[in-house]
Amino acid sequence: AIQFVPYGREHDNPPVTGEPNWDSDATRQLAVDACFSCHSNETEWPWYSNVAPFSWLLQQDVDTGREALNFSEWDREQDEAEDAPETIEDGEMPPLRYELANPDARLNEGEKQRLIRGLTRSLGVEDGDGSEDDDNSGPG
């Protein structure tokens, strides 16, 4: 009977209207692997997104994720963008249930740190001491 509840089957992917100025293709690919399913308009809807109650959970995750931070709508204010690196560092994202269902989202520690550094640069986030994180590769 729960299959007849209409929620969770919208599966829309609105148009991409803008993306961050990625610091590298590698950062974007890490974000695609670990974040884009819920934080972009490029969601790949798996087969179980048509089966209640999984469809309800997935739709709620995508709706909530896109509202909080949407890498596909960079032409609008992204209130939680500055928190993204810290949220990943704290282990709050990606959620465990997402990692279990999506092996590509399981970043090893090196990939996680590269994503955090890349997002910090790409999103213009300041590090804890008030200065922008840089790689210190140049003189000065």
Image (cartoon, rainbow, N blue to C red):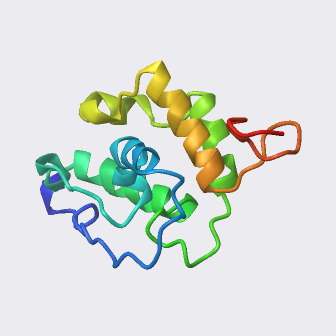
Quadrant hosting residue 8: bottom left
Outermost residue toward the top in this view:
109
**Apparent side of residue 25 relative to residue 132 in the rendered image (left or right):** left
Image height of 63 relative to 94, above or below: below
Residue 53 visible in this rendered orientation of the protein: no
Residue 113 visible in this rendered orientation of the protein: yes
Position in image of residue 135 (x %, y %): 67, 37
Residue at the spot 24% in from the left edge and 66% down from the top edge: 11
**Apparent side of residue 81 relative to residue 103 in the rendered image (left or right):** right
**Apparent side of residue 5 relative to residue 79 in the rendered image (left or right):** left
Image height of 9 relative to 24, above or below: below
Position in image of residue 91 (x %, y %): 56, 28
**Apparent side of residue 1 relative to residue 22 in the rendered image (left or right):** left
Position in image of residue 56 (x %, y %): 30, 53
Residue at the spot 56% in from the left edge and 44% down from the top edge: 118
Residue at the spot 20% in from the left edge and 56% down from the top edge: 45
Outermost residue toward the right in this view:
129
Quadrant hosting residue 68: bottom right
Residue at the spot 34% in from the left edge and 35% down from the top edge: 105
Image height of 30 relative to 11, above or below: above
The residue lying toward the viewer, choosing from 79 and 122, is: 122
Position in image of residue 10 (x %, y %): 25, 69
